[in-house]
Amino acid sequence: MDNFEVKNDFARRWEERRKEELAFESRQVEERFRASRVNAGILTLDIEPTNCCNLRCRMCARTVLGYDRQERVILGFMDFALYQRVVREAVELGAVSLRLAWYGEPLLHPQIGAMVSYAKACGLRDVGLNTNATRLNEEMTLTLLRSGLDRIVFSIDSPYPKQYESIRVGAKFEEVLANIRRFRRLRDELGIESLLTRANLVIMKENAHALDDYVALLKDHVDVVATGSFHDFQRPPAGFDADTLRAFRCPYLWLGMVVAWNGSVYVCSIDAGRRYPVGDATRESLGSIWVGDKYAQMRDLHRASRWCESPICARCNLVELFLEHYDMPSPG
């Protein structure tokens, strides 16, 4: 089933104001997809404020991999001084956007508002975060509204209370919906035009029939109502012939990186099991990690059409998404 977006007038005005920077980012993705240029620097950065979460969502890697049941998984919160250094170094390397999220709920971090404000003060043009909205009380809402945040994505996987609560275990449907409504209302009352709100539903077998009701429920409370594909991080890509798959090069290897709460650096957010760290931001600069041997090894596999030799990439069905939306260079 294809993903979709339903946008309101606010979203269209927001995109119009940002059309030049959105076009720049799109061009960069296309160019790096083809040229594979490391010296262009980092374009985008993902930072994990925390890997703690207050929910047990059925489709989430935290639940599937048993983060809270495994002694080897240490839970924690990113130190603010480390965060500041990572953001500064990313900006020096050319980063323009930041997403505060990975396998935790960012609103659990006690300094999340300060994190957003600091990133904006450093010059990042597009700062966003993903949240389950369970902790989005009025105080948190006002903190985020005053922080300079550019985008916020609310994860809502069903328009039906019982089904939603069976998917996002631990959340209360009516409370979450009330939080989202209040966020939109306060944003509009404060006259903030720079912050885009979005609801996202991950399409799964059990909720695929509910999309019309999902749009009807949320279209008056967020600017964009959208769906996303379920990422089965244990399934290899499918639906393309062997030559097309061999030609694939993942653009993210030349676009950005992911920094976990403890400073470990990963090439991609798909590495849910954190099996392939390429550096440690507590001991190394982002610049040295970006051009380091481990990153180079991953990029070389993709250049040589041997990306399936990487256990992470071989199990990434986001390959399908890239192949559907970009023209690939010829093999070799």
Image (cartoon, grey):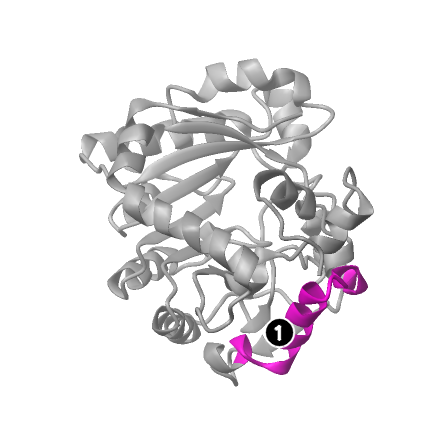
Residue 277 at x, y percent in the picture: 65, 72
Between residue 23 and residue 16, name the one nearer to us. 23
Q: Is residue 169 magenta?
A: no
The amino acid type of the residue labelled 1 equals Tyr
The span shown in magenta is 289-311
Using the image, determine if residue 127 lies above or below residue 189: below
Residue 241 at x, y percent in the picture: 80, 42
Q: Main secondary structure of the magenta part?
A: helix
Residue sitting farthest toward the bottom:
283
Regarding residue 77, the answer to whether it shows in the image is yes
Residue 29 at x, y percent in the picture: 48, 53
Secondary structure under tag 1 reads helix
Count of numbered labels shown in the rendering = 1
Between residue 148 and residue 246, name the one nearer to us. 246
Q: Is residue 295 magenta?
A: yes
Tell me the residue that label 1 is attached to: 295
- Residue drawn where x is 27% and y is 51% of the image: 148
- Quadrant containing the N terminus is top right
